[in-house]
């Protein structure tokens, strides 16, 4: 006798959709931070992690940055598009750090952390991000001021002038 009942076993691809790009990046970031804690000397349990440890992690990541940040004595300091190469260091861009901290802050709470004990929301971390933003905006001549949204204007109907015959 043939059983036509649907099978309870489904391939993994059908049972749950692939995570969004944000969720996948958040998982990678959380795993990277977990590795950082495990490699810390002595290894650091998440429950003992503080804002100071987050700052240590962000400074560690800085060495892998791809954004040229001109030093104060550099002739290109304040120029967004320098005309020639210079020896200034590559750093993590402020926007990348800000997004990273946001993802880790969310991951901390999703992994059982209490919001009031979230080291990624510590005052020291917020001040560090503000300092990095200000330093990079001055060094690169790029303003990070919030842009005001322009009001939507309705499209003006234009009549095309008839062309020559």
Image (cartoon, rainbow, N blue to C red):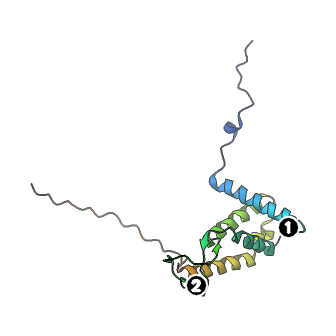
Find residue 157 and report its horizontal and vertical position in percent. 26, 61
Find residue 135 and report its horizontal and vertical position in percent. 62, 81
Q: Residue at x 20, y 59 (%)?
A: 160
- Label of residue 74 in the image: 2
Element assignment for label 1: loop
State which quadrant residue 120 falls in.
bottom right
Seen from the viewer's position, the closer of residues 160 and 114 is 160
Seen from the viewer's position, the closer of residues 120 and 29 is 29
Q: Name the quarter where the C terminus is drawn.
A: bottom left
Residue of label 1 = 40
- Label of residue 92 in the image: none
Find residue 148 and report its horizontal and vertical position in percent. 48, 74
State which quadrant residue 32 falls in.
bottom right
Mark 2 crowd level (few <14, some 14–19, many ≥20, 10 Å Cα): few
Identify the mark nearer the N-term, 1 or 2.
1
Q: Name the quarter where the N terminus is drawn.
A: top right
Q: In this view, which residue lies farthest toward the left?
A: 165
Q: Is residue 55 above or below residue 26?
A: below
112 relative to 14 in the view: left or right: right
The reply to whether discs 1 and 2 touch (Cβ–Cβ < 8 Å) is no
State which quadrant residue 33 falls in.
bottom right
Residue 113 in view: no
Q: In this view, which residue lies farthest toward the bottom?
A: 73
Seen from the viewer's position, the closer of residues 24 and 118 is 24
Q: CA distance from mark 1 to mark 2?
A: 35 Å
40 relative to 92 in the view: left or right: right
Element assignment for label 2: loop
């Amino acid at each position: 006798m043939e059983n036509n009942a649907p099978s309870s076993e489904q391939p993994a691809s059908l049972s749950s959709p692939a995570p969004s790009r944000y969720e996948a990046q958040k998982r990678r970031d959380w795993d990277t931070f977990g590795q950082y804690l495990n490699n810390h000397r002595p290894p650091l349990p998440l429950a003992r992690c503080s804002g100071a440890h987050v700052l240590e992690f962000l400074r560690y990541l800085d060495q892998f940055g791809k954004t040229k940040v001109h030093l104060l004595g550099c002739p290109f300091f304040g120029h967004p598009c320098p005309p020639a190469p210079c020896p200034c260091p590559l750093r993590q861009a402020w926007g990348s750090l800000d997004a990273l901290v946001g993802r880790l802050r969310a991951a901390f709470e999703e992994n059982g952390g209490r919001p009031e004990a979230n080291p990624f929301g510590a005052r020291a971390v917020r001040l560090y991000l503000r300092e990095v933003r200000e330093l990079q905006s001055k060094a690169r001549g790029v303003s990070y001021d919030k842009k005001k949204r322009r009001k939507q204007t309705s499209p003006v109907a234009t009549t095309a002038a008839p062309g020559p015959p």
